[in-house]
Image (cartoon, grey):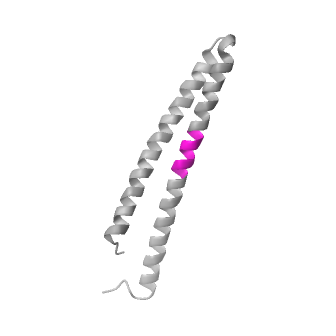
Amino acid sequence: MTSTPMATSQRRRLVDEAIVAYVDWREECIAVADAYGGWAATEATDAALAFGVYTAALDREERASQVYASLLRRADALVTADGEAAADRAASGGGRR
């Protein structure tokens, strides 16, 4: 499979973005666990505020997971397209030298 410098650069950028998105998502997962612990340990008078903190953490985690999933779908589409192009070249004899 032959790759242009532009395609290679795009793949690297996509991988970098996916790694950052994964780390962001994992950090939000930790924030959810921390917020839940805070809510579970709070006094009744502060429960509404602690629950608000927890639900906000859940919202951030959901958004981070959506960003990560979107990047993985883009990567999958790129790999699939590359694989189909390589299969087409091989079927036509274009992959042989």
Q: Residue at x 39, y 61 (%)?
A: 11
Q: How many marks?
A: 0
Q: Classify 22 as above or below 90.
A: above
- Looking at the image, is 45 positioned above or below residue 75? above
Q: Quadrant of residue 7?
A: bottom left
Residue 15 in percent (x, y) is at 40, 55
Task: Tell me which segment is drawn in magenta.
Answer: 61-69
Is residue 67 part of the magenta span, yes or no? yes
Where's residue 70, x and y in %?
54, 54
Image quadrant assignment for residue 55: top right
Q: Which quadrant holds the N terminus?
A: bottom left
Q: Residue at x 38, y 56 (%)?
A: 13
**From the image, which quarter does the C terminus lie in?**
bottom left
Left or right side of 88 for 66: right
Query: Percent x, y for residue 37?
Result: 58, 21
The stretch drawn in magenta includes residue 4: no
Q: Main secondary structure of the magenta part?
A: helix
- Taking the spot 43% from the left edge, 77% from the top edge, the residue there is 86
Residue at image x 68%, y 11%?
Answer: 45
In the image, is 71 to the left or to the right of 3?
right
Q: Is residue 18 above or below residue 40?
A: below
Residue 60: x and y in percent read 57, 37
Which of 34/67 is in front? Answer: 67
The front one of 56 and 97 is: 56
